[in-house]
Image (tube, rainbow, N blue to C red):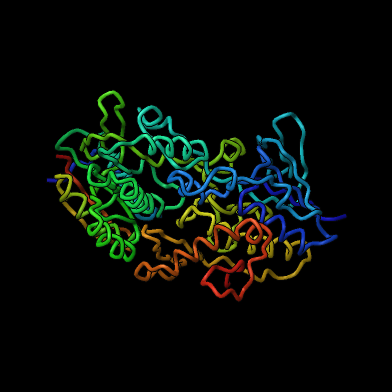
Amino acid sequence: MPAKVVVLGGGVGGTLAANLLAKELGRDGAVTVVDPTGMHHYQPGYLYLALGQTNGRWLVRDERTLLRRGVDLVVEKPTKLDPEAGVVQLERGGTIDFDYAVLATGARLVPDQVPGLLEGSYEFYSLEGAQRLREALRRFKGGRIRVGIAGIPYKCPPAPVEFVFMVEEYLRHRGIRDKSEITLLSPLNRAFTIESASKVIQPIMEQRGIELTTFFNVEEVDPSAGTVSSLEGEKTEYDLLVLVPPHRGQQLVIDSGLGDTSGWLPTDKHTLQVDGHDRIFAIGDATNLPISKSGSTAHFEAPVVASRIASLVHGTAPKENYGGRVMCFLETGNRRATVLRFDYEHPPAPPQPNNIWHIAKWAFNRMYWQTVPQGRLPDNLPLPIPTGRSES
Amino acid sequence: MSMQIAKTLDLKGLSCPLPIVKTAQGIKEIASGELVEALATDPGSVADFNAWCRSTGNELVEQGEEGGVHRFVIRKK
């Protein structure tokens, strides 16, 4: 009997894990992906969509087209996972039995947790949100743009910084930069959580006339007054407000009794096993690991999980550990970007932004559909791009 | 005189910037002049708590470290 492996979630982590599992297990495994929509989003593209640099059509594909032929796809919402019985319950009453499970269920946005956020602000953390923001920017005639963070943790920590740089360039091209004010409202006393990155970013913000308000943890938005206030007691007026909505883990995780109060899965930082469950693994945004919630993280975690499950099925010693590897590009506008490469032991040392990293990011964006979900990203690329495997 | 702690925040294991965010949330729940105690393991929290208190006007009454746990006592302004 082949081992039954169920992968919940068809994002970058779930899709790559399923494909690698099917490849590594061959006839020894039966791999099923369960995804509520059956559509795969390239989420890093939302930023470019919001700024009118691409369109939504390019950012979404049918999950089936990304999966190996041997992988089953169930397009339905999983509602509960019973770790002891090894059963996943589906919304319409069906069930899926499993020997091993990979939880790649991601994060969900909970904008209603912050009063006034839905009515008063825009975001680029969903396809619709990015489209709405794009249209709001098209209508924008100048004024005060405030960009802030309404809950931590959130996906892709550099994104708000990238947005202020890119919107600055956008307003210049539109000829309304001199009529506009751009402010980044940061939860800390610097532009970005990682200090070495802040040291690279802040001088560029200054050069470009982008203001930084420190220790501004968004508490509520007053859409009628056009103000946003912070837990620290500050209040500021806006004409266009862009806020990263609060994130939580999925309801399924909470309902299955596996997550913490916010729905994040307590996960072993090296083996990626869900605490207390040897046959259940978690990757990507769904975990409680103290590293970036990003596609890159999931991309580096998926091979580790596939390899460890294959070892369990074959009764061999596990070969791979996750070392916390993450790689994030950070666009600074003007066709430049820098890169943050780090792991549990090594903080990033980002280079000064240059055109090469910007081109690398564009190449990655273009190659994504043909390479990343399939685990086909070659090891020896002329461009400095992450490879699919993590060093253990 | 022993200090009366109105609220303790266990922020151990959380990484930057969560300890500051949770403290900003937690201090909302106590009255002006009362004390909040925050326990954090993130080494960056020392600089962050000092800067946050300076910036917000809350008073950092006490800070120390024991066995890798940083303790901050803050009086709400």
Task: Report the side of A371 relative to A229 (left or right).
Answer: right
> Image quadrant of residue A194?
bottom left
In the image as oriented, which residue stretches furthest toward the right?
A1
Left or right, A188 with reference to A72: left
Residue A22, horizontal then vertical, whole percent: 77, 58
Residue B18 shows up from this direction: no
Which residue occupies 40% across, 63% down? A337
In the picture, the quarter occupied by the N terminus of chain A is bottom right
Question: In the rendered picture of this protein, how many numbered marks are placed on residues?
Answer: 0
Residue A271 at x, y percent in the picture: 60, 62
**Residue at the extreme left:** B1
| Quadrant in which the C terminus of chain A is drawn | bottom right
Task: Say which residue appears at 59% left-offset and 39% top-offset.
Answer: A257
Q: Is residue A348 visible?
A: yes
Q: Residue at x 71, y 55 (%)?
A: A18
Where residue A78 sits in the image (x, y, percent)? 67, 37
Q: Which sits in the foreground, B2 or A142?
A: A142
On screen, residue A1 versus residue A110, left or right, reads right
Picture coordinates of residue A50, whole percent (x, y): 45, 43
Q: Is residue A156 left or right of residue A10?
A: left
